[in-house]
Image (tube, helix red, strand yellow):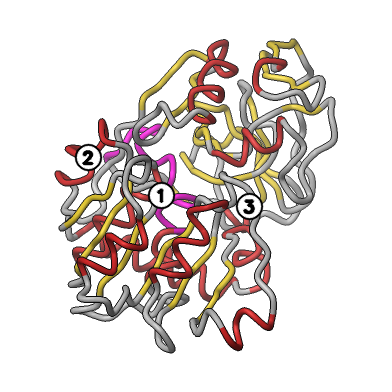
Amino acid sequence: MRALRQPTLDGPAAMELADVPVPAPGPGEVLIRVSAAGVNFADVMQTRGTYHGGPQAPYLAGFESAGEVVALGEGVGDVRLGQHVIGTGYAAFAEYAVLPAAGVAPVPAGWRDEQALGLVLNWATALAALRPLGRLAAGETVLVHAAAGAVGQAAVQMAKHYGAVVIATASAGKHDVVRALGADHVIDYRSEDVAARVAELTGGQGVDLVLESVGGETFTASLAAAKRVTGRVVVFGVAGGTVPVTNWDLNFKHHIHLIGLHIGVLIQHAPHIFGELMAELQELQAAGVYPPGEPTVHDLAEGPKVLAELESRATVGKQALRP
């Protein structure tokens, strides 16, 4: 089968097409014929060796895919052959991929496979950050970084549905996209002081919740933008680099709630919460809040180019590869 292989940790440009054997599912796993594979910033980080616990080169790239189940591993009882599912596993940028059965979700009825990309990653991450971890309540104000990205777009739509005032950050060329999703205010993070602008918009109080996926200087701005004592910052990305926060900082400088989120860890250690997220997302689909996704789909061979564009923040919304 065709697959994308990362031979070195020198970034997306090193990624190459390869002909490799079709994998076989192990116990508790399913094999799918991939219709579409989702592209995520974690894929970029893995190509540079900066994703914690990521694969060592050489490796087959990608971890999010949707398609038809064509083989079942031992002990799989809740997934059936021929079913169309979305999930995460390994070597997703390929014609066939293996997924853990416990982490797959059915493609919603009437949706094409590529329209379900993001269900168990982007939308589940955004919902976890807003609700069970971020404890968002109606009338509160939420700051969503990278609001034109896949997680950011989902977060803006859901936050508005749950009655929040949404302040979003995005580059100037993406502001119309973010406003169309329902954002009340959009800040150009490249030309404006985010923390100062948030203070202006909130009368100096700060926001109740920050969805932090960027890192670096943006993370520092997020800490400053959160409301003192009751403000929450949920961290689920480090695209812009790391910033240390000490116990001294939390005691004397940043009087906030700092919360870490990784959807894979949540699935593994709090499967009941993941189940609740999936049920809530089904309700949001029925209510029209979570519509079928329309990712920008590229041929598998364009994977290196798509990852490079994602790394440079040149993309809008969900990106996908079709084998």
Residue type (three-letter) at the residue carrying disc 1? Val
Alpha carbon of mark 2 to alpha carbon of mark 1: how far? 16 Å
Please say if 51 is above or below 4. below
Q: For the stretch drawn in magenta, what is the main secondary structure? A: helix
Q: How packed is label 2: few (under 14 Cα within 10 Å), some, or many (20 or more)?
A: some
Task: Where is residue 313? Give x, y as percent.
Answer: 45, 32
Seen at 49% across and 23% down, the residue is 309
State the image quarter where residue 245 is shown: bottom right
Task: Where is residue 29? Give x, y as percent.
Answer: 70, 47
Seen at 80% across and 39% down, the residue is 55
Task: Where is residue 265? Give x, y as percent.
Answer: 66, 63
The kind of secondary structure element at disc 2 is helix
25 displayed left or right of 65: right
307 displayed left or right of 12: left
- Which of the labelled discs sits on residue 101, or is there none? 3
Residue position for label 1: 151
Residue position for label 2: 175
